[in-house]
Structures are given as C-alpha cells and as structure tokens.
Amino acid sequence: MTAEIISIGDELLIGQVVNTNASWMAQQLHALGISIRQIVAISDDKEEIRTALDNAFSRTDLILVTGGLGPTRDDITKHTLCEYFGARLVIHEPSLEIIRKFFAARGLGLTEHNRSQAEVPDNCIPILNYHGTAPGMWFEKEGKILISMPGVPFEMEAMMENQILPRLSAKDNNLVVVHKTVQTHGEGESILMEMIRDWEDALPGNFRLAYLPQPGIVRLRLTAFGADKESVASQIESQIASLRRIIPSLIFGYGNETMEEVVGKLLISKHATLSTAESCTGGYLAHLITSVPGASEYFAGSVIAYANQVKHDLLGVSEDSLRNFGAVSEQVVREMAEGARKRFGTDYALSTSGIAGPDGGTPEKPVGLVWVCLATPQQTISKKFMFGEHRGRNIRRTALEALNLLRLQLL
C-alpha cells in the first residue's frame, strides 16, 4: 500500500506552525509497511484542496488529510470533502454527544457553531474524537481510502493510534517493515560513514540505512523489509551486533534513548553519585541530568560558576590558576571538577568551561574552545574540544561531551 499526506493550513505555509503531524504520521504508516510517496502542505483554499485530492488519488492508495475541521469560517476542509464526494452533511449523533459532554464539563453551553461540528458527509465513516470537537472522516473511493483528521496534534494522534492504525493494519499488507535506531556520539556524520562503509556496503538488499545527524549525535536508522516480522527483527539485531564490533565506544543507546538517560542508568547500577560545576554551559548540563525521572537518586547538585569569583569562593579554584591560565583552561576546569566533588561529597563530578560565542574569543582562545573535566575517586580526566561559532550548538555539544566522558568511565 502506498500513501500520501496532505496537510492543510495557511499557518504551515508561512512558517507560523511546524508540520510535526506529517512526520509523526509518516513514522506510524512506515511501521505498518505503508510506503509514503509524497507529503504536501497546501492553503485553506477550496480549489487547492480539490487539486491536491485529484493528484493524490491518481498516484496512491491511501490519503491522509489533516487540518481545516474547526468551527471557524477559514476551516473549509469538511465542506470541500462533502462536495468532492457528492455527499450532504448530516448530524452524527455519537459525535454530538461527545461535543455536549465536552462543553458541559467546562460549564459552557452548546452554540450552533459547536453543534455543527458533529455534522459529517453522509457517505463517510465517522471517526470519533474523544479529545476535541471535530470528528474524523473515512472515505472509500474505487478501492482507495481518504482519511480526514483534525490538525490539533494530540487529537489526530489519538485517532490514529486508537482507531485508524488498527483498521489499516488489518487490511491485506504482506510487507513487514522493522526499524531500529542506533544512537552514536563521538564522530561526525562523514567520519562515521567512512568508519562503517564496509559494513554498510555489505547490508542485505532488503535493508536501508539513514544517517540522522544533530549537534553532538548521529543517529543511524536501520530499516529492513520482509514477510515475517520476527525474522526481519532478528536480521536487524544481527546487523547491529556486527556494527557494535566496529564502533563499540561510539554507540551509547538505541531507539529514543538519550545520553542523560543512559548515564543515569549506569550511575544507578553502580550506586554512584554525581555533581556538576558549570561555566559555559550555564546549568544546561544539570538540566539534562535532572530531565530524567529519578535523577534525585544519583544527582546531588550543581554550581553554576560563571564569574571567576564564584569559581574561587564556591569551588576553591585558586586565584593563581585564574590569573595565570584564565577561566578557560585545563588547570581551572580540573580544579572546578575536583572542587565540586569535594563540596557535594559525590563519587563523580563534571565541569565545563569554554567560549560559547559568538563573541569573546581571542587568537589564543577562539570561540568554540571548550574544556570538560571528570573528577573520579581515582583520577581527574580533562579533555579539550574545538567546536564552531554557534552558541546554542556549542553549549549542547559541551554538555554531551561531558556526559559521554562519564559514560565511558562508568563502562
């Protein structure tokens, strides 16, 4: 089965709203073995919608449409679909009951505009919306399917997960698609590609590999196609086992695992504690650590030592080190980590200091120069990095490098 996604809304075309719906739907459909042929975004215009529908029906089996189902005058999708399929609008009583309860629970009366939300074309299969007021619509035409849903993400996702995907998966579809994502850190996309080139070239013909880079991380999404899900999943695990032998230290997790989650699990498994001392990351490292539920089990706290005086007063960094080497130096970052470990009484402490940019660099210490350090019960390990000139990316990459330094040590 092939599919096309049509996203309706002027807000998408002017960049006011990011089209997250399309990417989420594409992932869900691909997991069912449904191939996405095209994703388009169009305006709230009747002729644009009709043209998009004609084009989609000419080249695909399944069309998913989102947007334009609200009660305001610019929401014209339902009326356009009603005309397109030669139908008339009728009240769908189960949807009307949901709408009544929706407004009653909020102490509001039901207006005529609200009531009209329960109207659907008489030749569609209504899809109940338990999280909003606009029902979805399922049409079938000449063996092809069109499904229209609200553009509100949590309403659309609930419809897809609970009603639409189960129905689609029950249709005859012999192709099984299995994905697995490998999370890597430590090398950029081009270098990583060279490191695993032979492995990639040897992948079976039913495999696809995608490189998904972001600051500090490259995700490798491995996709395999076949007739039997268990067999395909086994093939993927076999290929990933081979990959682990090539880049064992670069792989830190799988699927949607984050570096901070992986480090947290390692700290728990070793009954170890952690603290941080941050300069250039300004608390972002501690934010990542505490974004993981249960971080209080291993994370004691942080000192955001942006000013030199704070480095000296709270972390015990010597004035001689600050004067002779500067805040962005190996000497200072080591004293920061050791000072944090002592102050918080933790097993491990991470520290960061650098020139995040876009200003503040010198020929000797350019923007993007960063030091990270890990103090352990046995030793203090420091590393120097040269990043770019983008402040946000530099902060993100610094925090990830610090966490990865701890990850490797814990392993």
Image (cartoon, rainbow, N blue to C red):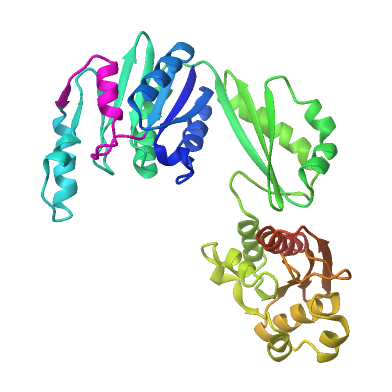
* For residue 300, above or below residue 97: below
Towards the viewer: 301 or 296: 301
Q: Is residue 114 above or below residue 60?
A: below
Q: Which residues are magenta?
A: 67-90
Q: Residue 174: image x %, image y %?
A: 52, 15
| In the image: residue 245, left or right of residue 220 | right
Q: Is residue 3 magenta?
A: no
Q: Residue at x 77, y 49 (%)?
A: 250
- Residue at 73 percent of width and 65 percent of height: 402
Frontmost residue, 268 versus 155: 155
Farthest top residue? Answer: 142
| Residue 388 x %, y % | 77, 57
Query: Which residue is found at the position 13% from the left and 31% from the top?
Result: 93
Q: Closer to the camera, 388 or 305? A: 388
Identify which residue, 324 or 93, lies in the foreground. Answer: 324
261 displayed left or right of 411:
left
